[in-house]
Amino acid sequence: MLPISIELLAVQLVNGIVLGMIFALIAMGLSLIFGLMGVVNFAHGAFYAIGAYLGCTLIGLTGGNFWVALVIAPILVGAIGAIAERALFSKIYGMPKYFQIFLSFGLILLMTETIRIIWGILAQTFVCPIELNFMINLGFFSYPFYRIFIISFAALLAISVWIFLQKTELGLIIRAGIDDREMVEGLGIGLSNAYTFTFSLGTAIAGLSGVLAGPLVLVYPEMSYDIIIKAFIVVIVGGLGSFRGPIIAALILMTLSTLTVLIWPPLAEIVIYIFMAIFLIIRPTGLFGQRVF
């Protein structure tokens, strides 16, 4: 057990919020895909990894321009997601869920091997953008400004996606499709393009999360395996098909994990699994989800 001071407690609390916002973005895209399309996409973590690698490459090609990577990498990942939806997932809609599971597992293996072929097996590191690489005074402790940027940027993106879903015509179609897919199709509104756009948007957000997380973590081929199980836990606790649920669940779970480090570090890796098990016994549908099984 680490000696706990107010400063250390505050630092770990903010660390939990930073990590929570990254997972919130990953889980938000995952939840959108499942909510509209019913796709259990275990390959979602691979799009996160590809986003991180593309970010590394773009930063190298542009002489260290993080902002180009932050814009271009998600667009490229979203394009890959759109191709995957049209070429693969669209062929198995309406089939049993295990077809989706097998397909997404195969896709994650394919994408991981592709990463190894293109970028190699050794880990790579991001360089934190120099304009954000300084400490900021938060009262009684100093904290890296880049991590505050992640919190602010992720929150702004989540609000933007929520406004899109609430205020635009395509957003309304996506929400209606999530609530009652058969009714929307019965009204003659085709969901094919909405499916492709939603899958592309979800994977683009995952890729953007990879770029944001790059300066904080090692970038290596198997990083998708480490992220996807925790992302699904966040989605399950938040509620399947819910938009706000995964965001709140990510903040709760990641903050719980980082604070547990102060009490007993070995427990930090499994505390979210324990929390999920206990929470789902009490509330099987998650925070804001509906029973789907």
Image: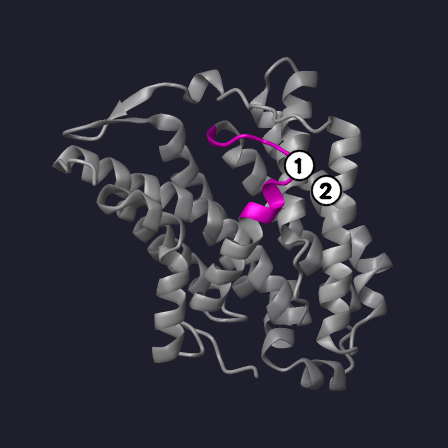
Residue at the spot 86% in from the left edge and 57% down from the top edge? 87
Please name the residue that numbered disc 1 is placed on: 221
Secondary element at image label 1: loop
Where is residue 46? Give x, y as percent.
67, 46
Q: Horizontal placement of 221 versus 251: left or right? A: right
Residue at the spot 38% in from the left edge and 33% down from the top edge? 147
Asked if the stretch drawn in magenta spans residue 225, the answer is yes
Where is residue 245? Give x, y as percent.
43, 65
* Count of numbered circles on the image: 2
Residue at the spot 57% in from the left edge and 84% down from the top edge? 293
Q: Residue 92 sits in which quadrant?
A: bottom right
Where is residue 39? Give x, y as percent.
68, 67
Q: Can residue 155 be seen in this view?
A: no
State which tag comes first along the sequence, 2 or 1: 2
Please name the residue that numbered disc 2 is placed on: 112
Give the answer, above or below, for where 186 lies relative to 28: below
Say which quadrant the N terminus sits in: top left
Q: Can residue 33 be seen in this view?
A: yes
Q: Contact, CB < 8 Å: mark 2 with mark 1?
A: yes
Q: What residue type is labelled 2?
A: Thr
Where is residue 191? Give x, y as percent.
75, 71
Residue at the spot 54% in from the left edge and 31% down from the top edge? 214
Instruction: Classify 10 Å Cα crowding around label 1: few (below 14), some (14-19), many (20 and above).
Output: many
Residue placed most toward the observer, 37 or 114: 114
Furthest-top residue in view? 63
Magenta stretch, residue numbers: 216-226
Q: Residue 31 sits in which quadrant?
A: bottom right
Secondary element at image label 2: helix
